[in-house]
Amino acid sequence: MKSPTLQMTGHVPVAEIDTRNRLRPVSDAGVESLIASIGEVGVMKDPIHVRRKKNGDLVLIAGGHRLEAAKRLGWETIEAKVWVDVTDDWSRLMEIDDNLAGAEMNPLDTAVFLAERKRLYEKLHPEAKAATGSALAAKRWDAADTMSVASFARATAEKFGMSDRHVRRLIEAGTKLGVDSARLRQAARPVTLKDLIEIAKIGEVTERYAVIDALIKGEAKSAGEARRVWIAKEKGSAAPEKDPAEDAFQALVKVWARAPMAARRRFMHEFADDLAELEGGAE
């Protein structure tokens, strides 16, 4: 099989680029931010990446937000790196890595992208798949750990500047979400990693659907609250009392979402020791 080859770097017609089958839709905020940047500096900083199929069709690999910005600006062409001899897996990996490395993504998008990256990684590196049974014991794995293999978690954590534990939790959540990820994008409030982990625990389809539906309609502030309400309803009891810790957590989420990036960075710097201690001691 031939290796992917960079055929050219140049301008290609915007209207001829196929953008179907993407892992996530573009965000209006991300596109508008790019448009503002282009207005300030006068150019788009980076070219997009496309693959040219054997029939000549151009398919987007990486740069969905850049392409959408070009469309809204009315550009007829956009600068692109055009690749040939590209497999679907290679194309998907480039899309994933481009987003993980360069885009500000929410926990839902990150979980979906990392879960897909793990699937492709193990497809390309079968030896990295998690062992089971006696092989698991031989590799000194914790049998309760159903998350990604250590080699992948470490490599991904280093590549994208995350902790191993954070990567594993995101992968576990993303793997178990499946088709529910599309519905969760409609949630009235931003879906947190805690929400994803809670949803991943649900085995019963009816409960899972009800919890996600409650988040979409804004009937619950979190997946945990939605689960408590659903369980109480199934048992025929009154709605459970509110959890003070959950209310405090949601208040922090709202403040964080409104805070500018400079304030977030200052917060991370000021409380770095506290956050590291919490991360290391969390179960």
Image: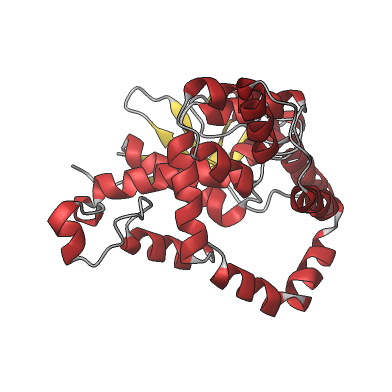
Position above or below: 113 against 18: below
Quarter occupied by residue 203: top left
Given residues 112 and 81, the one toward you in this image is 112
Given residues 281 and 100, the one toward you in this image is 281
Residue at 79% from the left image edge and 64% from the top image edge: 264
Residue at 76% from the left image edge and 53% from the top image edge: 245
Q: Is residue 69 left or right of 11 when viewed as pictured? A: right
**Residue 52 shows up from this direction:** yes
The image position of residue 88, as x and y in percent, is: 34, 35
Given residues 49 and 7, the one toward you in this image is 49
The image shows a total of numbered marks equal to 0
The image position of residue 65, as x and y in percent, is: 65, 39
Q: Is residue 3 left or right of 62 when viewed as pictured? A: left
Position above or below: 17 against 32: above
The image position of residue 228, as x and y in percent, is: 66, 34
Given residues 137 and 124, the one toward you in this image is 137
Q: Is residue 210 left or right of 28 when viewed as pictured? A: left
Locate the N terminus by quadrant: top left
**Residue 49 shows up from this direction:** no
Quarter occupied by residue 190: top right
Residue at 73% from the left image edge and 42% from the top image edge: 30
In this picture the colour scheme is secondary structure
The image position of residue 101, as x and y in percent, is: 55, 56
